[in-house]
Amino acid sequence: MRVINVDKNHIKQFVDFPQKLYADDDKYVPYMLADLTKTLKRLILKDKTYRALLVTEKDEVLARVLFTVDKNKQLNTEKCGFFCMFECIDSQKACNLMLDEMVRQMRDMGADYVSGTYFPFDQDNRRGILYQGFDRAPLIFTSYNPAYYNDLLVNYGMEKQTDALAYELKRNYVDDARLQRIAEFSQKKYDYRVETIDWKHLDRDIADFYSVMQQATNEIIYQDAPTMQALYNIVAQWKNYLNKDFILVARLNSDNTPIGIAMALPDFFQVFRKMRGKTDLKGILAFLKERKKITSIRAIMQYVVPAYQHTGAIVSLYRKMISSCDKNGITYAELGTIMENNAQSNGAIKALGGKLARVYRIYYRKI
C-alpha cells in the first residue's frame, strides 16, 4: 500500500475511482467526468493551487483526496488546510496513510489546521461529509458518501467543527393561506415586490445579487460573498441547469433597490444518474429526455439585507418560489445547506413547514 502524488499520469485514476467504489449504490450520482477531468488538470497541473493524493495497492486505487491551503476565518488562521473529494474504501489503514501524507504536506505549506470537506471555490455546495440522511438519493450539488466515512475521520483524530443542515419541504407541508397573509402584509407595509430575474437585463440582476449578498453575509453564514466575476462564472457554469422561475429578487417599488434574493436549482441529479457521468450520445439523449421529468428542486441560497430581515421578506421570496414550483410541476424541495447556528434562516424554513432531512458534518483538527 502506497501514497501517490497525483500528476498528469494519475488524473484518470483519480476521476474514475468513485465509479468502482459506488458501483453497487443506486443513490450515488457521478460527476460529469469530462468536466471534472478538465477542472482537476487546471487546479493541479496548470494553476498548481491544489494537490491530490491516491492510495494504491497492486495498481488498485483504495483512496483519494484533493486539498489546498488558504485562509479560514472561522478558525482564525491565515493558513488552513482544506480537503475535498475524499473517497476511501472501508479501511482505516488506507485512510490514515493518505491523511498522514496530506497533513504532512499541509504542515510544510504552513497550515496549522485541517478542515473539510469543501468543494473547490464553492462553499455553498458539496460541503461536509453526509452524517445523517442516507435514506434518500442526494439532490443536485450536495455531498453523498458511505456512512463509514464519519468513523474513518473520527478515528483519525478529527472532530466536529460544525454541521450544515438541509430541510425537506413537500408541497403538502405548506400552509398556503398563512404564507399568502404574511407575504401580502409584508409587501404592502414595506412597499416591495418579488420578481424573477430577466435574462435581458442579466448585468443588472447579477449586480443586484452581488449587492444583497455583500450586505447580508456574516460570520454565521460561513463564507465570504462571491465577487461579481464569481457570480458571472456561476451563471456561465450552470447555464444548462438554471430556470429563471427559481431565481428571484425582491425590490423596493420606490427606487428598485434590491433587498432580498433567493435561488433554487432543478434537481438535475435525477438526470445525471441516467447519464452515467458521460456526455456521449447516450448521455446527451438521456439529458434531453430526463430533464423534462424533474420533480424536485434544491434551494441553494436565500439572503435578505439586514434592514429587512425581520419584515417577512424571506416569506415573500419563498411564497413566490412555491408558486414557481406549481408552475413547473415540482412537488419536493430541499432547502440548504444552512449552518446549524444560523438561527434566523433555520427558523424561517421551519416556519414554512420544512423538516430536517440531512446533516452534513465539517471536520477539523489542529496539525
Image: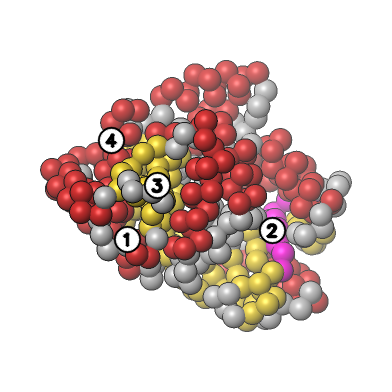
Quadrant occupied by the N terminus:
bottom right
Residue located 36% across and 39% down the image: 195
Measure the alpha-carbon separation of dots 4 and 2: 41 Å
The magenta stretch is: 57-69
Residue that label 1 marks? 308
Q: Image quadrant of residue 296?
A: top left
Q: Amino acid at mark 3?
A: Asn
Tell me: 364 left or right of 290.
right
Measure the alpha-carbon separation of dots 2 and 1: 42 Å
Tell me: 39 left or right of 121.
right
Q: Is residue 299 visible?
A: no
Q: Earlier in the sequence, mark 4 or mark 3?
A: 3
| Most common secondary structure along the magenta stretch | strand
Marks 4, 1: nearer the viewer = 1
**Discs 4, 2 touching: Cβ within 8 Å:** no
Residue that label 3 marks? 256
Q: Name the secondary structure under disc 3.
A: loop
Pointer 1: residues within 10 angstroms few (<14), some, or many (20+)?
A: some
**Up/down of 307 relative to 299, above or below:** below
Query: Which residue is nearer to you in this view: 284 or 93?
Result: 284
Marks 4, 2: nearer the viewer = 4
Q: Image quadrant of residue 56?
A: bottom right
Residue located 28% across and 31% down the image: 326
Q: Which mark is residue 8?
A: none
Marks 3, 2: nearer the viewer = 3
Where is residue 138? Give x, y as percent. Answer: 45, 45
